[in-house]
Image (cartoon, rainbow, N blue to C red):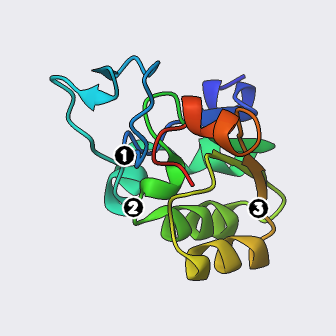
Amino acid sequence: MELSNLITCLDFEISSICNAGCTVCPRGTIGHYSQFTQTYWRIDEVKAHIDLEIIQNLKTLILCGNFGDPMGNPDIVKIVRYFKEINRSIDISISTNGSIGNSTDYAELAELGVSMRVALDGVGEFNELYRVNAK
């Protein structure tokens, strides 16, 4: 059995871009980036580095954010569309703080059937304690 047949879920951090300056973030000190370059995967890089056979066999694609927010990637809709063109039955979910990106991208992702997970750390002022600049 080939390796591409064994991979059914891909947890893919496509962006280290984040609009927040959270005090507890490991990227910086007291909400300020220190020696951290924000970047993202471009659609041409995704096409060059992820084998078609792997995409064809995926059941799930999770676009996550450990050091950034996937919605900070300007190519996010192109990336999702690319995966959907190759594998129409793939289940795609995105985890975001919900305060980055634009309404056009959110609408296009909804039309593509993406599940969106918005992470909050409380309501109102409590969320703002941890999610600095994430309104």
Badge 2: residue crowd in 10 Å (few <14, some 14–19, many ≥20): some
User: Left or right: 64 with respect to 124?
Assistant: left
Q: Position of residue 117 (x, y in %)?
A: 76, 47
**Res. 92 visible in picture:** no
| Mark 1 nearby-residue class (10 Å; few <14, some 14–19, many ≥20) | many
Q: Position of residue 29 (x, y in %)?
A: 28, 18
Apparent side of residue 91 relative to residue 75 in the rendered image (left or right): right
Q: Is residue 106 above or below residue 9?
A: below
Which label is found at residue 43?
2
Q: Amino acid at mark 1?
A: Ile
Residue closest to the eye, 95 or 97: 97
Q: Nearer the viewer, mark 3 or mark 2?
A: 3
Alpha carbon separation for disc pair 1 and 2: 16 Å
Instruction: Count up the numbered dots.
Output: 3
- What kind of residue is marked 3? Val
Q: Determine which quarter of the picture holds residue 86.
A: bottom right
The residue beneath circle 1 is 17
| Residue 15 position within the rendered picture, expressed as x and y whole percent measured from the top left | 41, 44
For label 3, count other residues whose C-alpha is less than 10 Å away and answer few (under 14), some (14-19) or many (20+). Answer: some
